Image (cartoon, helix red, strand yellow):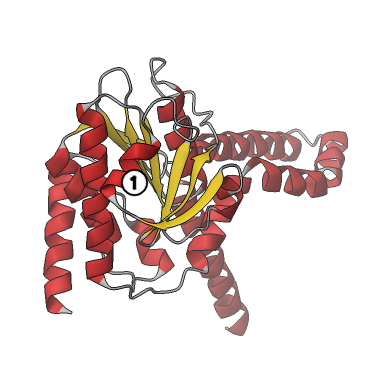
Amino acid sequence: MYIWINIILQIAVLAIVYYYIFLFFKGTRGAQVLIGLILLLAVLVGATEIFNFGALNYLLRRFSVYLSIALLVIFQPEIRRALAELGRQPTFAASSLKRNTIDHVVQATILLAEHKLGALIAIERDIGTRAIRETGTEINANIAPELLASIFFPHTPLHDGGVIISGNKIMAAGCIFPLSQNTELQKNLGTRHRAAVGLSEETDSIVVVVSEETGNISVSYRGRLSRGLDEDRLRRFLTALLLKKQTESPWKRAQKKLDLTPEGIAESESRTTKENADV
């Protein structure tokens, strides 16, 4: 009896581990790679067992250690994000401070969009961006719409790069964001949009983009790009993400999939407003 209970517990633990691994990888670039590797290994292991390929079985066992190292390298961004989520601590920053940040970012973004001035603004959340900040120029100034917008005016030294905001401060400008290598992105996307997606893939930052050609506003979060936002939708998007409660467990957050449609953003904002009113 004890042996069966032990076996059932082991199976349950493995099932839970595999389930949450797939949740963390779901929707990322590494998901397809993970599925491909699983299928390849399943075919190879199945072939060695069915056809009794002793040499192939021996090679698979010998290369298992190297395969583990290769997996760490291949899935480094996803693993880093998952560990950051696990170590994430609840934060209880004042809602008024975050609302001020949202208002300032929205005002600056609309001003830049009206003048068709390209911009790249990242709002840091829980995963730090120190390495990205160091590629630019430190500012460490209180955020203000006029200051934020003036950074992106043409011919200024810092306009051709990204701005990083942390809390209520502009931490750095002229930063170089990592470009996304996602082949599923539209071919007509420019460098700014790819940089926005790239940073949102590696961190949980919210990245606002203003197109220099059209003045259109886009937002990237978790590697997903939502385009063609107006002032109202941009404000709802930022409100839904920055003012939501932070007391949920990492497992619960992992199961939630952000709806980037206007309806999804509006629904998320409605829940956030109700939660803040109950606090």
Please give the count of numbered marks on the rendered protein.
1
Residue beneath disc 1: 147
Q: Is residue 89 visible?
A: yes
Q: Quadrant of the C terminus?
A: bottom left
Query: Is 275 rendered above or below residue 279?
Result: above
Towards the viewer: 176 or 226 = 176
Horizontal relation, residue 67 to residue 183: left or right: right
Query: Is 191 rendered above or below residue 9?
Result: above
- Residue at image coords 44%, 43%: 163
Towards the viewer: 206 or 55 = 206
Query: Is 58 rendered above or below residue 143?
Result: above
- Residue at image coords 22%, 48%: 237
Task: Tell me where residue 119 sits by quadrant.
Answer: top left
Q: Is residue 15 visible?
A: no
Category of crowding for the residue at label 1, using alpha-carbon neighbours closer than 10 angstroms: few (below 14), some (14–19), many (at least 20): some
Q: Secondary structure at mark 1?
A: helix
- Residue at image coords 33%, 69%: 246
- Residue at image coords 12%, 74%: 277
The amino acid marked with disc number 1 is Leu
Residue 202 on image: x %, y %: 52, 46
